[in-house]
Amino acid sequence: MKIAVVGTGYVGLVTGACLSDLGNNVWCVDVNEEKINALKNGEIPIYEPGLEDLVMNNFRAGTLKFTTKIHQALADSDICFIAVGTPMGEDGSADLHYVLGVAESIGQYMDHHMYIIDKSTVPVGTAQKVRAKVQEELDKRGSSLTFDVISNPEFLKEGTAISDCQRPDRIVIGTDNDNAAKVMKELYLPLVRNNENIIFMDIASAEMTKYTANAMLATKISFMNEISNICERVGADVNKVRLGIGSDKRIGYSFIYPGCGYGGSCFPKDVQALIKTSKDFGYTTKILNAVEEVNFEQKHVIPRKVVERFGEDLTGKTFAIWGLAFKPDTDDMRQAAAITIINELTKRGAKVKAYDPKAEKEARVCYLKDNKNVEYCDSKYTVLVDADAMILVTEWKEFRQPDFIEIKKRLKNPVIFDGRNQFDAHSLSDKGFEYYQIGVSSKLNK
Ligand code: UDX
């Protein structure tokens, strides 16, 4: 099949690479010339395991091509994915500026029938807006070309994006047209185990499905974080509670890990956008507001524990941070808990030393660029030298089983704050550490 994917961010690049790997001819389009030139030279703009090989193999094979010229891609495609960003606008709603910009270009340049697929996370009603925009441009040039708009939300996770795309739990297709449904089935059949994994529905329900999935997952996390805050106060251990409830098949083990608050490009933005959409339609959300509020506060739990241990004035203290990315296996720091934690500590006079296997550049050039009290180190052990305590923020694999003798040798005090509950409290206590976790009463840590 001949496909154009507009937007070479996370979703667009992964989708383009995976579809080209199946033998489709794919054009990846982006307005950013630097990015497109870099991709042509084999430089991948994001860190995502497996992506570089997938992109380069298919680029060399000629099934994956890059261009800044959307008309070139459209001329050679029957299907066009819109996979551009929908950043959070000032009022919390999804900013559709880029999506509608692509729709405008499609209307200006298409020269045959197109299947236009909304892959970006967009609020209910966007497909209609895309349709209207394309039609407006066709009308302007007196064209009678036809097209279909389809909603096909993406559920991939950073860090496992390739396998999520190649072996999706389900493909959701929102369409009001049998032909479009047939084409989508043909496109996706190689990726699903059987037809049942392709779920067809109306467009509004497909648009709503994406937000509901992310809001549900964010709710599970905030719920568990709230439980962890109760556990700490009543003398319980949330790690035990998690196992106790996860074993109930109706609840399950996934997404009930307490931590220092969810981050990333999706949960924070999508929960807010859903709150805003509901408001626009006259409904005031309650649960979703609480999900947001708990998450905001959860990012302050580690700084609060540090203050309880070291005092409100942290002048003269140094803290070693393990992990900056919002989760492991990515260099993405959007809405990462590390940002809040580090800024809260330095605000109180502390110095911070940070190590992350992949996200240092993001921190330096963007998310922590204004914070002059952060020093970056190149390994998990060097970052500890002369620090008053270590704070684990992102659960990278290399932090799972560290050498505690080496840690103790370097730290000024054997104190660990763990934002991801990675270690065994009793074993750390035996080794002489003071160990603070999320959701565990301090008397159970000894
Ligand atoms: C998410 C959705 O999972 C994905 O389906 C959607 O397409 C995009 O948004 P992503 O943002 O890549 O994916 O990361 P995810 O693995 O879902 O983690 C999001 C955040 O939640 C991270 O900060 C993570 O640390 C946190 N989290 C996750 C928890 O705190 N506890 C958990 O139990 C699970």
Image: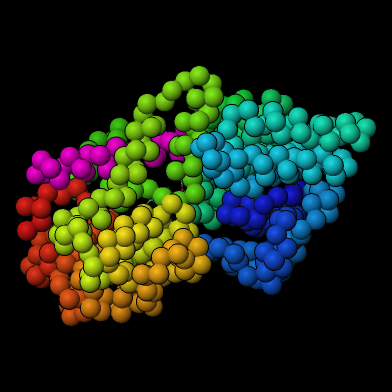
Image location (x, y in percent) of residue 54: 61, 63
Q: Quadrant of residue 10?
A: bottom right
Q: Residue furthest top?
A: 282
The colour mode here is: rainbow
Q: Does 344 appear above or below 413?
A: above
Residue at (34% x, 38% y) in the render: 293
Q: Does 99 appear above or below 60?
A: above
Residue at (49% x, 45% y) in the render: 266
Image location (x, y in percent) of residue 66: 74, 61
Image location (x, y in percent) of residue 15: 62, 51
Majority secondary structure of the magenta segment?
Answer: helix
Judge from the rendering whether residue 355 lies leftward or rightward of residue 385; answer left or right: right
For residue 182, say whether it is visible: no
**Residue 300 is covered by the magenta coloring:** no
Query: Which stretch appears magenta?
Result: 212-237
For residue 351, say whether it is visible: yes
Q: Residue furthest right?
A: 142
Q: Which quadrant holds the C terminus?
A: bottom left
The total number of labels drawn is: 0
Image location (x, y in percent) of residue 26: 73, 54
| 80 or 107: nearer the viewer | 107
Judge from the rendering whether residue 425 lies leftward or rightward of residue 25; answer left or right: left
| 68 or 98: nearer the viewer | 98
Residue at (35% x, 44% y) in the render: 296
Q: Does 174 appear above or below 14?
A: above
Judge from the rendering whether residue 52 lies leftward or rightward of residue 327; answer left or right: right
**Residue 228 is covered by the magenta coloring:** yes
| 144 or 233: nearer the viewer | 233
Judge from the rendering whether residue 63 lies leftward or rightward of residue 343; answer left or right: right
Residue at (21% x, 43% y) in the render: 228
Q: Does 344 appear above or below 253?
A: below
